[in-house]
Image (cartoon, rainbow, N blue to C red):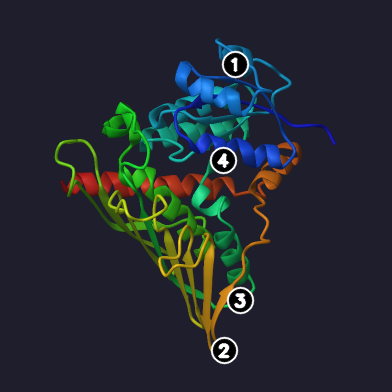
Amino acid sequence: MAETRFAVIGINHAHIYGQVDCLLGAGAKLVGFHAPEDDLAKQFGERYPQAPRLTDRRRLLEDESIAMIVSAAVPCDRGPLGIEVMLHGKDYMTDKPGMTSLEQLTEVRRVQAQTRRIYSVCYSEHFETRSTVKAGELVAAGAIGKVVNTNGLGPHKLKNLPRPRWFYERHKTGGILADIASHQCEQFLFFADALDGEVVAASVANRGNPQEAELQDFGEILMRAGEVTGYARVDWFTPDGLPVWGDGRLVILGTEGTLELRKYVDIDGRPGGDHLFLIDRQGVRRVDCADVELPYGRQLLADIRERTETAMPQARCFKAMELALTAQAMAEARG
């Protein structure tokens, strides 16, 4: 089997390390990176000394031996870069949000349909958490009957790491729903087993950071896909006393049971993350997720080789961003 070679362009968010590691762990080879910021490049180069830093990104885009470009650039730059990558005949994996406006999404969809390249958004709250993967297996096996509703919470700490200036600029981030809530939109579609859906209601606000006028520190969405409904709440209000960056949770209600995921911390004191609970007619069970495989990297590499969609249907990738961007626009139109 031929080795899949990939390169990185844009390392402005620390999610790039998870993206790169998932591909390396699946057997791909990192062959180079481009980043104009010397401080970020120094850290990245120390972690991945096998990858030379190139000053001209065109060398990576035009290298026919490179199959995929991976990016965690400033959010507003991710969509345009993805278009450039696809027009160079390469597949693309980007951090969320995959784009920051509905106009960008329209153009990305057009070029993806034209080139038939893979445009994958790494929704890490799904693809990099074992409890979410295991919950998907349980739902598919009928453990809770038919899914009725999902309730996804994405709280974050605002000051758990230094924030660059672009983080506080609305046009560069896309807003809180486009950014953070794209995770919850993708999981809603996944657990609803749907490739289409609609936003019923949405709101955003700045409730606690008046010194940063463009920051949205609270957002919520109500969604529907067929008979399944979903609610998402995202915010920047996680207290400093929590030992992790956020108490991300997901509750999946079914006709015959409920799944609850406490992804990153159990505030009752149990160590580690990926706490998954199944409540059904037999009682309440804690489901061990320690040995659950994270298949996204392996599946994405197979998709690159075989031109399949096993890691994530392209339609769901785009629809999740469409829901998040639509909710963002709806919320801001309300004022």
Q: Residues within 10 Å of mark 2 (few under 14, many from 20)?
A: few
Which of pointers 1 and 2 lies earlier in the amino acid sequence?
1
Q: Which one is in front in this view, the residue at disc 3 or the one at disc 4?
A: 4
Distance between mark 1 and mark 3 Cα atoms? 48 Å
Q: Which residue is mark 4?
A: 18
Q: Residue at x 47, y 56 (%)?
A: 196
Which of pointers 2 and 3 lies earlier in the amino acid sequence?
3
Residue 291 location, x and y as percent?
Answer: 68, 61
Distance between mark 3 and mark 4 Cα atoms? 31 Å
Which of pointers 2 and 4 lies earlier in the amino acid sequence?
4
- The amino acid type, in three-letter code, at marker 2 is Gln
The local secondary structure at tag 4 comes to: helix
Which of pointers 3 and 4 lies earlier in the amino acid sequence?
4
Distance between mark 2 and mark 3 Cα atoms? 14 Å
Residue 290 location, x and y as percent?
Answer: 64, 62
Q: Is residue 27 visible?
A: yes
Q: Which residue is mark 2?
A: 282
Res 211 quadrant in image: top left
Residue 300 vertical position relative to residue 266 in the rendered view, above or below: above
| Nearer to me, 6 or 112 | 6
The local secondary structure at tag 2 comes to: loop
Residue 18 location, x and y as percent?
Answer: 56, 40
Q: Which residue is mark 1?
A: 53
Residue 331 location, x and y as percent?
Answer: 24, 49
Q: Residue furthest bottom?
A: 282
Q: Which residue is mark 3?
A: 142
- The amino acid type, in three-letter code, at marker 3 is Gly
